[in-house]
Image (cartoon, rainbow, N blue to C red):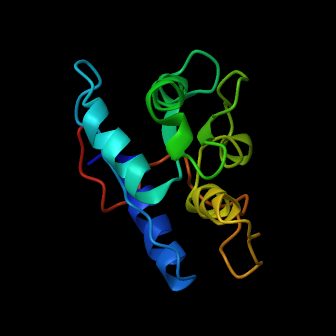
Amino acid sequence: MGAISLEAVRAANKLAEENIGAEVIDLRTVAPLDDSLILNSIRRTGHLVVVDQGTLTAGFAAEIVARVTDKAFTDLKSAPELITLPDVPAPATRALSNYYYPTISHIVAAGLRQHGRTMSNRYESVRPQDLLDIPDRTFTGPF
């Protein structure tokens, strides 16, 4: 399980506290891509939030959204959301990197928006002293 997948699982747990069920799909391969796994989830839930530590433009998250809208558009209840790295150069300082990487808060907020809700302030916010450019200590690889 990748580092961002751990964040997605934690976000799903936070969403469950808000009575929103979320399925987390941790893709182990991107070529070949198991479209059926993703499409079956869309047909069950009607929602899509793609979390990827790649860039927004020309990233793999965009490929997922393209495939879903091509093959299961009518199953979507809301517009797909992408949580990715921004289209800017990677930061070289901790202070900037803490606002660069996707976090649990980004994922929870997207999940709530999928259901027409907004995020309250009770979820953690990023602090300058946080080390978001270092994977969670529970993450053991692959690197």
* Residue that appears at 66% across and 41% down: 97
Q: Quadrant of the C terminus?
A: top left
* Frontmost residue, 99 versus 122: 122
Quarter occupied by residue 90: top right
Q: Is residue 79 above or below residue 69?
A: below
Q: Is residue 75 above or below residue 136?
A: above
Does residue 118 sit above or below 45 in this rendering? below
| Quarter occupied by residue 88 | top right
Residue 143 in sight in this render: no
Residue 142 lies, in percent from the top left, at 23, 38
Q: Quadrant of residue 18?
A: bottom right
Q: In the image shown, does 111 or 78 lie closer to the viewer?
A: 78
Residue 82's x, y, as percent?
61, 39
Q: Is residue 10 left or right of residue 25?
A: right
- At x 56%, y 61%, the residue is 104
Q: Residue at x 50, y 24 (%)?
A: 70
Is 138 on the left or on the right of 113, as rendered?
left
Residue at the image point whose x is 47% and y is 78% from the top: 16
Which of 87/126 is in front? Answer: 87
Q: Is residue 59 visible?
A: yes
* Left or right relative to 30: residue 57: right
| In this picture, residue 131 sits left or right of residue 94 | left
Q: Position of residue 120 (x, y in %)?
A: 76, 78
Numbered circles on residues, count:
0
Looking at the image, the residue that sits furthest to the top is 58
The picture places residue 41, in percent across and down from the top left corner, at: 36, 50
**Residue nearest the viewer, comparing 126 with 72:** 72
